[in-house]
Image: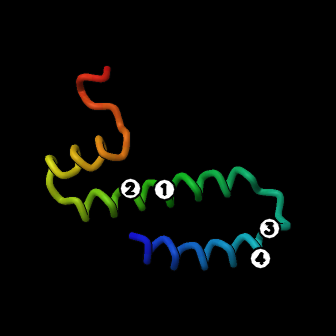
Amino acid sequence: MAEVVEKLRRYLLGWKGYFGLAQTPRIWRSLDGWIRRRLRALQFKQWRRGKTIYRELIGLGAGGWRNR
């Protein structure tokens, strides 16, 4: 995952430098949301099983069923 984020970071810094002068904050927010969603999907795909996903999310501090 760190390798994917580092490659993506290089592209995004370049895009920000090139398109940074444009006044399009809505575009950057929607791009940010899309990128985060795709990174979550990639992480879930690497974890594969439901038990693993649950265990990892709890380990990262997400609330479990009992915390509601």
Marks 1/2 in contact by CB < 8 Å: the verdict is yes
Three-letter amino acid code at the position of disc 3: Gly
Q: Disc 3 vs disc 2: which is toward the camera?
A: 2
The numbered mark, 1 or 3, whose residue comes first in the sequence reads 3
Label 3, secondary structure: give it. loop
The answer to whether 40 appears left or right of 65 in the picture is: right
Front of the two marks 1 and 4: 1
Q: Is residue 59 above or below residue 12?
A: above
Mark 4 sits on what residue?
18
Residue drawn at x 23%, y 50% as measured from the top left: 53
- Specify the color scheme: rainbow
Q: Residue at x 24, y 27 (%)?
A: 65
Callout 1 amino acid: Arg
Q: Quote the CA–CA distance across marks 3 and 4.
A: 6 Å
Helix, strand or loop status at disc 1: helix
Q: Measuring 51% from the left and 79% from the top, which residue is drawn there?
A: 7
Query: Residues at badges 3 and 4 in contact (C-beta under 8 Å)?
Result: yes
The quarter in which the N terminus is drawn is: bottom left
Name the secondary structure under disc 2: helix
Q: Disc 1 to disc 2, how far (Cα)?
A: 6 Å
**Number of numbered discs visible in the structure rendering:** 4
Where in the figure is residue 36, as x and y percent of width and height? 48, 56
Callout 4 amino acid: Tyr
